[in-house]
C-alpha cells in the first residue's frame, strides 16, 4: 500500500475559499490556529504550510499572516519575520488584546476612568481597586489602558 505524501495529507485538510485564504479544516486550537501532525511532532498548520511550500523555517522566525486569518495556510499569505515584526504588525492592525479583552485584566473600563479622575495617593487608590501603586501610576500616565485616553 502506497504511503500518502505529506503534501497530499496536508492538502486533505484545506478548503480553498473565494477570499484566497486556504482554510484549515482539521483540528484548530481555541486561538484559531490549525495543528498539523507530522510523524515526529505536532506543528502549527501555517508553519507547516510555509515549510512545505516555501522551504525550511529560519530559527527564531515567526510565520506571519498578511490576511490576518489565523486558520489560513495559503503560502501566498505567509511571510517570515521576527517576533518583533509580528508584534508590530499585530499592533498596527489592532489585533492585540487590550483592556477588558486582555486575559489578565482586573479592571473594567469604567474603573480605569474612575482611577484617572481619582484624587489621593497612589497607595490609597490602589487599595480601593486591589491593584498595585505601579498600575495606578501607569493608568494615570497613559502607559496602560492608553486606548481609553
Image (spheres, rainbow, N blue to C red):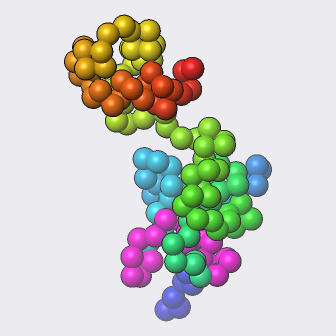
Residue pictured at 63% horizontal, 65% vertical: 81
Up-down: is 97 above or below 110? below
Residue pictured at 32% horizontal, 10% vertical: 120
Q: Where is residue 115 in the image (x, y as percent from the top left)?
A: 39, 14
Horizontally, residue 83 falls left or right of residue 66, namely left
Quarter of the image for residue 131 reads top left
The magenta span reads 38-55
Residue pictured at 49% horizontal, 92% vertical: 1
Residue pictured at 36% horizontal, 24% vertical: 136
Horizontally, residue 41 falls left or right of residue 78, namely left
Q: Which residue lies furthest to the front in this view?
A: 121
Q: Position of residue 65 (x, y in %)?
A: 65, 56
Quarter of the image for residue 54 reads bottom right
Q: Was residue 138 drawn as part of the magenta stretch in this picture?
A: no
Q: Was residue 47 drawn as part of the magenta stretch in this picture?
A: yes
Is residue 142 in sight in this rendering?
Answer: yes
Horizontally, residue 140 falls left or right of residue 48, namely left
Amino acid at each position: 500500500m502506497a504511503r500518502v505524501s505529506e503534501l497530499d495529507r496536508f492538502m486533505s485538510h484545506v478548503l480553498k475559499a473565494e477570499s484566497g485564504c486556504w482554510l484549515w479544516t482539521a483540528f484548530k486550537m481555541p486561538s484559531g490556529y490549525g495543528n498539523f501532525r507530522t510523524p515526529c511532532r505536532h506543528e502549527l498548520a501555517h508553519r507547516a504550510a510555509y515549510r512545505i511550500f516555501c522551504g525550511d523555517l529560519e530559527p527564531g522566525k515567526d510565520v506571519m499572516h498578511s490576511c490576518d486569518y489565523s486558520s489560513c495556510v495559503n503560502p501566498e499569505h505567509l511571510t517570515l519575520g521576527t517576533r518583533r515584526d509580528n508584534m508590530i504588525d499585530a499592533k498596527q492592525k489592532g489585533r492585540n488584546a487590550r483592556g477588558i479583552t486582555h486575559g489578565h485584566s482586573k479592571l473594567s473600563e469604567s474603573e480605569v476612568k474612575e482611577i484617572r479622575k481619582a484624587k489621593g495617593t497612589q497607595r490609597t487608590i490602589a487599595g480601593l481597586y486591589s491593584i498595585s501603586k505601579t498600575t495606578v501610576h501607569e493608568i494615570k500616565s497613559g502607559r496602560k489602558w492608553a486606548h481609553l485616553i
